[in-house]
Image (spheres, grey):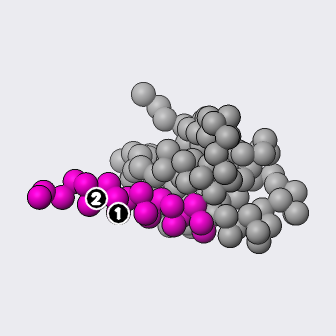
């Protein structure tokens, strides 16, 4: 099975928005949907959520702008996200929502980890 990070990101954004989640919640859901290691070319592993440009890519998915996951040997992990967002798009207020989303993800992980610990 070939997993395409763009399709996962786009689908997660659409479903979260259809559920009426707040923007930070939507971003957290999308981030978690792709926050997994994948096998890349030559067996090299990468995580599309931990790749340069992820915040803007999530914004693009949420609002219907074009975005791509591209190979880039110069980036950590060998990939990066590109997008075609207007200059006003991924603005500082929206970037702060992405930070809020990362805090939600961290809180969720800590809760899951605490539940998994033996009593």
**x, y (%) of residue 84?**
81, 52
Q: Residue at x 49, y 35 (%)?
A: 3
The residue carrying pointer 2 sits among few (fewer than 14), some (14 to 19) or many (20 or more) residues within 10 Å by Cα, namely few
Which residue reaches farthest top?
1
The secondary element bearing badge 1 is classed as helix
Q: Nearer the viewer, residue 89 or 18?
A: 18
**x, y (%) of residue 81?**
64, 55
The residue carrying pointer 1 sits among few (fewer than 14), some (14 to 19) or many (20 or more) residues within 10 Å by Cα, namely few
Instruction: State yes or no: discs 1 and 2 in contact (Cβ < 8 Å).
Output: yes
Which residue reaches farthest front?
119
Q: Residue at x 51, y 66 (%)?
A: 103
Q: CA distance from mark 1 to mark 2?
A: 5 Å
**x, y (%) of residue 70?**
62, 50
Using residue 70 as the reference point, say whether residue 84 is left or right of it.
Answer: right
Using residue 49 as the reference point, say whether residue 26 is left or right of it.
Answer: right
Which residue reaches farthest left?
119
Q: Nearer the viewer, residue 75 or 66?
A: 66
Residue 68 in magenta?
no
- Which quadrant, please, contains the N terminus? top left
Using residue 60 as the reference point, say whether residue 5 is left or right of it.
Answer: left
The residue labelled by disc 1 is: 110
**x, y (%) of residue 98?**
63, 63
Residue 100 in magenta?
yes
- Disc tally is 2
The secondary element bearing badge 2 is classed as helix
Q: Residue at x 55, y 54 (%)?
A: 28
Q: Is residue 23 above or below residue 66?
A: below
The residues colored magenta run: 99-119
The residue labelled by disc 2 is: 113
Q: Main secondary structure of the magenta part?
A: helix
């Amino acid at each position: 099975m070939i997993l395409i990070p763009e399709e996962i990101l786009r689908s997660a954004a659409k479903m979260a928005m259809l559920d009426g989640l707040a923007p930070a919640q939507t971003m957290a859901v999308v981030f978690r949907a792709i926050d997994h290691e994948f096998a890349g070319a030559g067996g090299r592993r990468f995580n599309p959520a931990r790749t340069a440009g992820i915040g803007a890519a999530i914004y693009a998915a949420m609002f219907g702008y074009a975005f791509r996951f591209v190979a880039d040997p110069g980036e950590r992990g060998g990939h990066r996200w590109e997008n075609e967002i207007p200059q006003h798009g991924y603005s500082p207020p929206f970037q702060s929502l992405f930070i809020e989303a990362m805090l939600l993800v961290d809180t969720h992980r800590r809760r899951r980890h605490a539940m998994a610990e033996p009593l």
